[in-house]
Image (cartoon, rainbow, N blue to C red):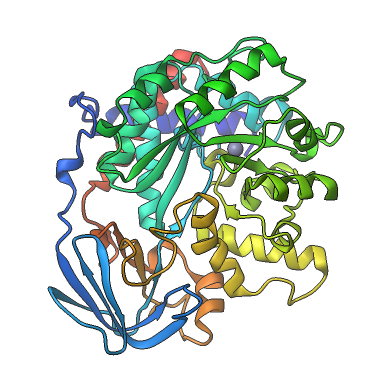
Amino acid sequence: MCDICRRHFIRGAAALGTSGLFSSSLMAQTPNAGTSRLPSRGEFTIANTYVMTMDTALGDIANASVHVRNGEIVAIGADASTGGERIDGGGMIVMPGLVETHWHMWNTIFRSFAGDKAADGYFPTVARFGQQMMADDIFQSTRLSAAEAINSGMTFVHSWCHNVRSQAHAEADLRALAQVGIRARHSCGWPQGLPDTQSADQSPIEALAKNWNSWSNEGLITLGMGWRGQFRAGPIKPEVYQPEFDNARKLGLPITVHVAAAAHRAVNQIELLHKSNLMGKDIQLVHALAATPAEIDMIKESGASVSVSPGSELRIGYGYPQISEMLAKRIPVGISVDTSALTGSSNLFGVLKLARDSENARAESEFKMSARQALELGTIEGARSMGIDDKVGSLKPGKRADLIMINPNALNMAVVTDPAHLVLEATTPENVDTVVVDGRILKRGGKLTALDTSEVISGARTSLAGIRERTKWR
Ligand SMILES: [Zn+2]
């Protein structure tokens, strides 16, 4: 689209937005507001179905039942106990919900907004418009993302919130996650536009940590720190980054940081972290595309995890992720959306397919990564990388019921051959029939049960229109 067409189109969309229905989402100002609309947990049995447990001992089970009570998987198997409502799973594939590991949900409102010239690229676009976001804009964007996540089969997301302009902005992100009912980590970051010479204000994260029980949506949401690290466009001084890091450690929070994208190959950022004694089990490294073999050893030694986002990494030209190299060292790896401003659709099945394809492309082999390995990255391995594999990521008795039902009885999925290949290569959000988070059915028969989709969309549209007004972007 040419520049002028683009502006006309966006102005038209903004006009549509202002005439759309809009209900204020921040009317209720108490923590966990809106969760009363979530369905209750109860008891049900998905019967007569094909289950991909993603558990090495249980494997795939045909003609199986999955019995869920009060948010927990009670029994699973061909002869499993049953109870509660019977949900017919005939012809369906049941598997764990997908685990997403790094997503700037606050900027989904700028979906596909990164243009084709340097001035319209991702970073200037997001920095410019991000600085005009009010707390409610964050709410609208994160709610849109979380609704999309549920709709496309993700049951866990890592909301990487690096536009915390005030306490209210962080709270808006949390309120959106709670209202949708998704399992999540909120990593509280800094405001867009903050100079690299200035430490991020620690008061929002401190306030959240102090009062976390009231924000956690009954434990579904956990808190972390989104850290700028030691290097962005250039080096950041220790007096700027060290207090931020130390504060997260003092609060006992996991830390996540972007490192070693292709543009920064001149600096060995992981080695720098290692030498500065800033690595550990509580650190998630995002991208790490330019990691040297020595740095991969440092990641392994430290116990840190890695999140890669092939959808955005390929789109922005960072290069290929080094998933095989990380897995060879048994480093926990998760797959992520990163940002819808670059990727458009945030369907994680599509990103997992890109992860497999990019590994096969680099290896010039059809067989470098199996379909099942790619699905593991999106489920149990992703959960391990986020430290939640004891609760979710695979289906077995005692785990929380985060699961999805895929209906392959559709033109893009018929007919079922090899389930792992089919699920990885063909699943779209429309094929995701049912989504359960912690025993709550949040999507059923292809429809979201706890959200008004048109309200979610019109709220986001109105927000973007307001941001465009405030930035005087014509
Ligand atoms: Zn990112």
- The residue depicted at 52 percent of the width and 21 percent of the height is 247
Location of residue 168 in the rendering, given as x and y in whole percent from the top left corner? 34, 19
Does residue 68 lie above or below 469 as drawn? below
Res. 370 image quadrant: bottom right
Does residue 70 lie above or below 214 as drawn? below
Location of residue 465 in the rendering, given as x and y in whole percent from the top left corner? 40, 25
Res. 278 image quadrant: top right
- The residue depicted at 72 percent of the width and 18 percent of the height is 236
Location of residue 24 in the rendering, given as x and y in whole percent from the top left corner? 22, 27
Q: Nearer the viewer, residue 151 or 67?
A: 67
Residue 13 can be seen in this image: yes
Does residue 361 lie above or below 63 as drawn? above
Task: Tally the numbered discs.
Answer: 0
Q: Nearer the viewer, residue 222 or 349?
A: 222
Q: Nearer the viewer, residue 151 or 117?
A: 151
* Quadrant for the N terminus in the image: top right
Location of residue 153 in the rendering, given as x and y in whole percent from the top left corner? 40, 60
- The residue depicted at 58 percent of the width and 57 percent of the height is 351
